[in-house]
Amino acid sequence: MAPEEAISTNLPLNISDKSKLPSDRLGFGFSFQDVPGLRLSECRLVEIDSCRIEMVRDGWDSVYVDIKTDLDKRVKLRGMGISCQSSQPSVATPQQHWERAALPIEIWSGNYGHWLAYHLPKLMIFADNGWTNKIALPERGRWKEVEARDADYLSLVEPATTQILKLGAGTTSVAKLAVIDGDPHHRMLLRKVADQIKKRVIAETSVERRRILISRRGAGFRRLLNEDALLNALLPFGFESVSLEGLNLATQIQIFAHAECVVGMHGSGLANMIYCPDDASVIEIIPDEFPGPDFYRLANTLELKYYLLFGESVGDGQRGQRDMVAPVDVIESLVRNSGF
């Protein structure tokens, strides 16, 4: 599907020294300093005969899956595996049986950003390889919107989809199971996902480019306390504030497909950069206490122009989820001098 490759070695355009990037890997397994030239493993479709799926959900409604052969041997795949904290006694007798199924599991697919960058490429690969009506999705609790997102995507690119298999907690036996192994985060796969969907929802041939500030007003955490001041500073440069909460997939695609520049706090909305034109710019404001590098990696994978700024975390709350104050003067100066 996609060979092993190294992503772009580009530094953020406003940072000239790699040592100035955060080195904390947090829970991501890589840091900002690791991103330039980061290697992505080969991504491939694998078919497994006569196996069983064991699925559990934790208190956050994250889905964990083990795949075991008839010899009770666990199949090791990226993005799958039941952690010891989530493990429950396996059920020897399967609750259901499928002859054929395709399983696009990602533990954190309840998060929109992870769904877009990791889960969606898997759906595309299955759809492109004849597994459209055999896709198995876990029954969710608090993350039921994942099912709606998948249905939206399939209805756009595969209107012939008539069924989705429901994977319940416990054990399911499968005569032939298709899974994706390796990193689905390749430029080729992400661009193909975006191009397929944009062909369905973008009708205009010539549309004015947009400059977007992603609003966090409707967020339950990591709000931008000086968002009004930031928007007022950006309005003279043609920026508009966009709230993404409640927008369907097609509407979000239409917004970002014509973006010239996107300014946003670290958050799932930034994953929509996969729909941006190749020459778009992304300005990310990250919490000073929680430098998550995933959107820098995404921007480098897509070879977009990326700028990194730090916001000040304030107030109470969990690390990485506290409210923030953005450096308005720095952002205004960057926009003024960058000539987007």
Image: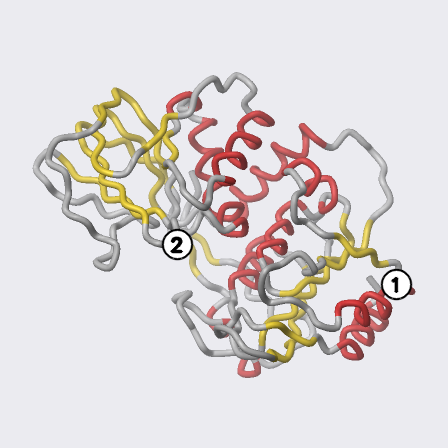
Judging by the rendered image, the residue that carries numbered circle 2 is: 60
Mark 1, mark 2: which one is toward the viewer?
2
- What is the quadrant of residue 149 in the picture? top right
For this view, does 77 lie left or right of residue 296?
Answer: left
The percent position of residue 228, horizontal first and vertical second, equals 80, 68
Which quadrant of the figure contains the C terminus? bottom right
Using the image as rendered, state which of residue 4 and residue 245 is in the foreground: 245
Q: Earlier in the sequence, mark 1 or mark 2?
A: 2
For this view, does 47 lie left or right of residue 218?
Answer: left
Q: Residue, x 35% and y 54% (percent of image)?
A: 59
Q: Is residue 278 above or below residue 91?
A: below
Looking at the rendered structure, the secondary structure element under dot 1 is helix
Count the labels in the image: 2
Label 1 and label 2: CA atoms lie apart by 38 Å
- What is the quadrant of residue 285 in the picture? bottom right
Tell me whether circle 1 and circle 2 mark residues in contact (CB < 8 Å): no
- Give the residue at the far left of this rendering: 71
Q: Residue, x 22% and y 40% (percent of image)?
A: 54
Q: Is residue 245 above or below residue 331?
A: above
Q: Residue, x 77% and y 29% (percent of image)?
A: 203
Q: Residues within 10 Å of mark 1 (few under 14, many from 20)?
A: few
Which quadrant of the figure contains the N terminus? top left
For this view, does 57 lie left or right of residue 207?
Answer: left
Q: Amino acid at mark 2?
A: Trp
The percent position of residue 266, horizontal first and vertical second, equals 60, 64
- Give the residue at the far right of this rendering: 236
Q: Amino acid at mark 1?
A: Leu
Residue 235's mark?
1
Q: Residue, x 56% and y 20% (percent of image)?
A: 159
